[in-house]
Amino acid sequence: MSAVLVRSLMATAVALAAAVITAPPIIRSLVRLRVGQIVRDDGPTSHLAKTGTPTMGGVIMLIATLAGSLAAAGSHLRDLGWALFVSTGCGLIGMLDDYISIVAHRPLGLRARQKLLFQLVLGLVLGAYGYITPGLGSEIVIPYARGARLDLGIWYIPFVALVLVSATNAVNLTDGLDGLAGGTVAIASFAYVAIASRLRLPAVGVFAGALGGACLGFVWWNAHPAAVIMGDTGSLALGAALASMAVMTKTELLLIVIGGVFVAETLSVAIQVISFKLTRRRVFRMAPLHHHFELAGVAEPKIVVRFWIVAAFFAALGCAGL
């Protein structure tokens, strides 16, 4: 077993334990503070039962990811500092969004352009980090092309910003069913553990392992019926974490494959909006895609497990493209 894989598994174990153990007191605190989920009235009617479920549970994953990273990083902590910074930064944006939503008693907190601006800033920071860091630079790997690379030059910085914005919002769209986003991000994270092990990148392996463990520990409490919901605090942080790992491994394009479920969810929304605007007809019963299956009568837990299986397929396919 490689040293990278050993460190990754250690990070996974610590983060998993941290999430499972810290969740109950955090959930109790959220209940006392009356930090409850506000469900949109234009979603499936079955989701109205989720109203009042403690939200902002993404804090659990942020704490657990940090714990796992600190426990296993050793001398590599500095190398994964930017991933922790960017994911925590996006988590704070999500936390502000959740807080405004709760205080204002509305399903949406920050305005879309406000969230986009904050995400762009962090994306540009991440892109600049990759651009100036020795060993990273402005090249990106072309998937399934036997190590071929493309040098984007200075355009690499806005490209990374686009990757981060896309990833954060894709995970946010996927976070609509109990255990769905947490489970799919865990699977994608373990794909990055495999990639880090192959590329001998211990910092990435530790961060990916910690993130995967944190997600699994969170799903323990978020499984249907959820005792806590991650909110934008969690979904934005998770998307930023995936983007960070893609930058650190130069697999920004491969993230499209590894995160195939997130891409499908995002495309379903885009197709639905475009179709309705052009033809006044809907392609899906409701978007994102998981809601389509809900309205088709498939039980929520069954949808989640099936999406996990699809996510595992895309993760394996992505690992094969390096």
Image (cartoon, rainbow, N blue to C red):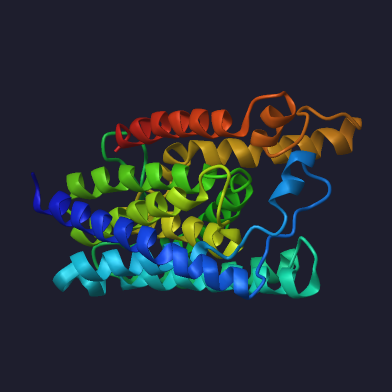
Q: Please, is residue 126 above or below residue 303 in the view?
A: below
Query: In the picture, residue 14 is in which quadrant?
Result: bottom left
Q: Looking at the image, which is closer to me, 3 or 159?
A: 3
- Write the residue at 58% across / 65% down: 56
In the picture, measured across the screen, residue 149 lies left or right of residue 165, that is left
Q: Looking at the image, which is closer to me, 102 or 273?
A: 102
* Observer able to see residue 186: yes
Tally of numbered discs? 0
List x then y, in percent, for residue 157.
47, 65
In the picture, measured across the screen, residue 71 lies left or right of residue 186, that is left
- Write the residue at 43% across / 67% down: 62
Instruction: Specify the quadrant that holds the N terminus.
Output: top left
List x then y, in percent, for residue 281.
88, 29
List x then y, in percent, for residue 254.
40, 42
In the picture, measured across the screen, residue 76 lies left or right of residue 120, that is left
Q: Please, is residue 295 above or below residue 142 in the view?
A: above
- Write the residue at 26% across / 48% down: 193
In the picture, measured across the screen, residue 6 lies left or right of residue 30, that is left
List x then y, in percent, for residue 213.
33, 53
Instruction: Specify the quadrant that holds the C terminus.
Output: top left
Q: Looking at the image, which is closer to me, 125 or 65?
A: 65
